[in-house]
Amino acid sequence: MALFPFCKTPAGAVRVTRLQLVLYGFLLSLIIYFLHGRKVGVSVKSPHPYFHAVEMAGGRGMTDMAAVKAAPAQTPVETPWGAPLVWGDTRSSAWRRTKYAQQGIRTGLLALVVGTYAQYIRRFLSSAETYFLPGQMVTYYILTDNPRSLDPSIELGPERELKVVPIAELPGWGRLAQRRMTLLADAIRNPIGSEVEYIFCADVDQEFVAPVGEEIFGDLVATLHPELYGMPRNAFPYEVEEVSSACVEEDEGDYYYTSELYGGLVSEMYKLARACSLLILQDQANGLTARGLEESYLNRYLIDHRPTCVLSPEYSWWDSDLSADVPVQRLVSLGRQCEAFDKEKREQYRC
């Protein structure tokens, strides 16, 4: 019986001990029940769409882009290295507009117009007159193999100027992409470098649809790709061939930038264009072409020289299932958007 003291008839102090044990057991049961409930509650929460997409892909590392884009949109206002990430209607953007508007800056907007891209030039310039740096001094630099595409001349507002820079004919998209950075570097060296303080390079098959103001100014400015903003790093189409000058290693890269719009101080833009043109020429000599053409070399350069100002996808957007949801669409790529349209929509949007 000594081995089983609780089998004795309870009396005195022993009765208190049994009561305590009963209470302890009851409390322990409550704790276990509570913890188990919490665990179940956590386990039934919906996983992040990215992890769901990977799971649906059978663990092969494939990514369902549309599923990832279902994640709630975020609008951070700073990059991991402390540069402003610009959304046009934030207080920080309003402050930047006030700061730069008082400096009387002369800015250049450069577009390459060759072959059939001449069809976009009037729409591009007309929209820029309305929305690009309103009230500021702007010079449009049009690099073209067909200066007659600008006849008759386009009427410009006060403090606006148009300069045509003739270039040799460049048939074929591939050849154009290979020459674009060289043409930009040559134009900055003469005449742009002595005429403006900032220069922005934009694809001509775009349309400004909302104000693009002084918030875009910075020493080196890049724009986030609208279809890749918010995507995981392994979705970025960086060049992966190690023999290419544009190659990006797996542990490199913060964002993927579009070549639709980038800019900055003329001195910084010359460095960018010169460096990228040399990388392209180096690959050409070895019979190589980067997967993203000049955009691959642009991203390589911006990894090594992080931009001092990053523009959100508001400043480069087109209608796509993958494009980020943005508060305001400011610059829309007609070319990329029209690729997905049927004949009726192409006519509607004057593609």
Image (cartoon, rainbow, N blue to C red):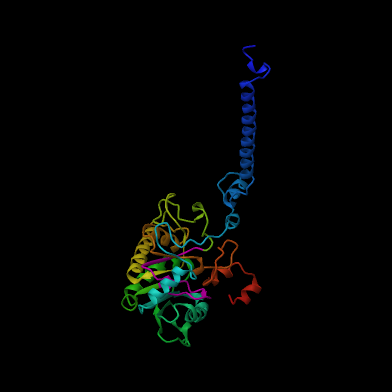
Q: Quadrant of the C terminus?
A: bottom right
Residue span colored magenta: 200-225
Q: Quadrant of the N terminus?
A: top right
The answer to which image quadrant residue 59 occupies is: top right
Q: Residue at x 39, y 67 (%)?
A: 181
Q: Is residue 163 above or below residue 263?
A: below
Q: Position of residue 150 (x, y in %)?
A: 47, 83
**Residue with the most extreme top position:** 1
Q: In the rendered image, is residue 170 in sight?
A: no
What is the total number of numbered labels drawn onto the structure image? 0
Q: Is residue 247 above or below residue 143?
A: above
Is 177 left, or right, of 348 in this rendering? left
Q: Is residue 173 above or below residue 109?
A: above
The answer to which image quadrant residue 36 occupies is: top right
Q: Position of residue 135 (x, y in %)?
A: 43, 82
**Foreground of the two, 47 or 98:** 98
Q: Position of residue 149 (x, y in %)?
A: 48, 82
Q: Residue at x 39, y 79 (%)?
A: 165
**Foreground of the two, 325 or 333:** 325
Task: Assess whether residue 126 is covered by the magenta stretch.
Answer: no
The answer to which image quadrant residue 19 occupies is: top right
**Foreground of the two, 338 or 158:** 158
Q: In the rendered image, is residue 302 in sight?
A: yes
Q: Position of residue 7 (x, y in %)?
A: 67, 16
**Foreground of the two, 132 or 59:** 132
Task: Assess whether residue 202 is covered by the magenta stretch.
Answer: yes
